[in-house]
Amino acid sequence: MKPDSLSDTLINSLPNPILIHADRVVVFANAVVPEITGLPMDQIIGRDLSELLTDPNDPINKAAITKLTGDHPGEEVEITIRTANRKVVIKNLLLRNRRIRYKGKNAILTIIIDITDRINLEKYIVNKVMETEEKDRQRFAADLHDDLGPILSSIKLHLGIYNDSEKPADYRETMRICNNLLAEAIAKMRIIANNLMPRLLDKYGLESALNAFIGTVQKEGTFMVEVKSNLNGARFPRTQELHLYRILCELINNTVKHSGATSAEIVLDLSRGTLAIRYSDNGKGYRVDPGSLKKGGMGLNNILQRVNLIEGEIKFVRKNGRTEVRIKK
């Protein structure tokens, strides 16, 4: 048995393509390399590295190859393989490199990892984040236009009447109306500012911020929200608190807009390092299936994305014709 036969067997059994090259010339390739290059082994050994790894549709660009050679090769180098028109990415490859001694000579070992799926996932997440930000901007613009706009216009109208009138009684009535409208405008502004960035969340945590939000949406005799919690001021990492807060606000908004409910209940239960959340209302329930998620109905996509970002778990349970949302982190 040759001394290097066991190591060669192990390397050839690995799923990743592995190259060893010295002065840009390939001196070793494991059994996976021919599969990704389409070349037989006898055409790989002795070949210039750039002929194997440079994008065939962009042969002039050898910047990545220069990072694999020389006295200080890059530990990690990414290269992109595109279609002939350079518009569509076929593969994204990550090359991990280490200087070694091979058969008594200085060489570089390169492990090739296909990161195409990872890159596509990162792009998908970025696109979804941008979509969410755009929806938030649209909601902010709508709040300003629909809520504050009419109030401020009404104040301007009444102040115009005040300016044109010469009767003291008209002055008092106009000032009363303007004071009421200004109070309403201030309340609306606080709601909008809280939706953009809840200050209570940073200062006092999830439970306090949630109760403050509930105070802006519930109406006595029309819609009420009950919160049952044993958090007792417990705090979590800021990102987790923000995502959980947004999830619960989205659920409440969905209830107000779509369910026809008159009440909702939120249970926050912290036990042995696990936060369990249950949300339910007395409105008409809904089923969660792949079809409803594709349509993006009721903000479910945003909720699922936020749960995934904090590596939590979520279930939608049908009970007596209603839907209960259960989240664990």
Image (cartoon, grey):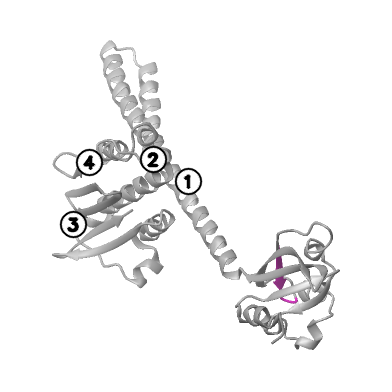
| Residue beneath disc 3 | 283
Q: Which residue, given by chain and number where applicable, does mark 1 sit on? A: 137
User: Which residue is found at the position 18% from the left and 57% from the top?
Assistant: 283
Among the two numbered marks 1 and 4 on one chain, the one whose residue lies closer to the N terminus: 1
Residue 79 locus on image (x, y percent):
71, 66
Query: Are the residues flagged by discs 4 and 2 in contact, CB closer than 8 Å?
Result: no
**Disc 4 residue crowd, few under 14, some 14–19, many 20+, Cα 10 Å:** some
Name the chief secondary structure element in magenta. Answer: strand
Give the total of numbered labels: 4
Cβ atoms under marks 3 and 4 closer than 8 Å: no
Quote the CA–CA distance across marks 1 and 4: 24 Å
Answer few, some or many: residues within 10 Å of disc 3's Cα (few below 14, many 20 plus, some between 14 and 19).
Answer: some
The residue stretch that appears in magenta:
78-84
Q: Earlier in the sequence, mark 4 or mark 2?
A: 2
- Indicate the amino acid at tag 4: Gln
Mark 3 vs mark 4, CA separation in Å: 15 Å
Q: Residue at x 23, y 48 (%)?
A: 269
Q: Position of residue 40 (x, y in %)?
A: 75, 88
Q: Which mark is residue 303?
A: none
Q: Which amino acid type is marked by label 2? A: Asn
Rounded to the nearest angstrom, the CA distance separating label 1 from label 2 is 11 Å
Residue 82 horizontal side relative to residue 158, left or right = right
Instruction: Please name the residue that numbered disc 4 is placed on.
Output: 218
Element class at badge 2: helix
Circle nearer the viewer, 1 or 2: 2
According to the picture, the residue beneath numbered tag 2 turns out to be 195
Residue at 71% in and 72% down: 81
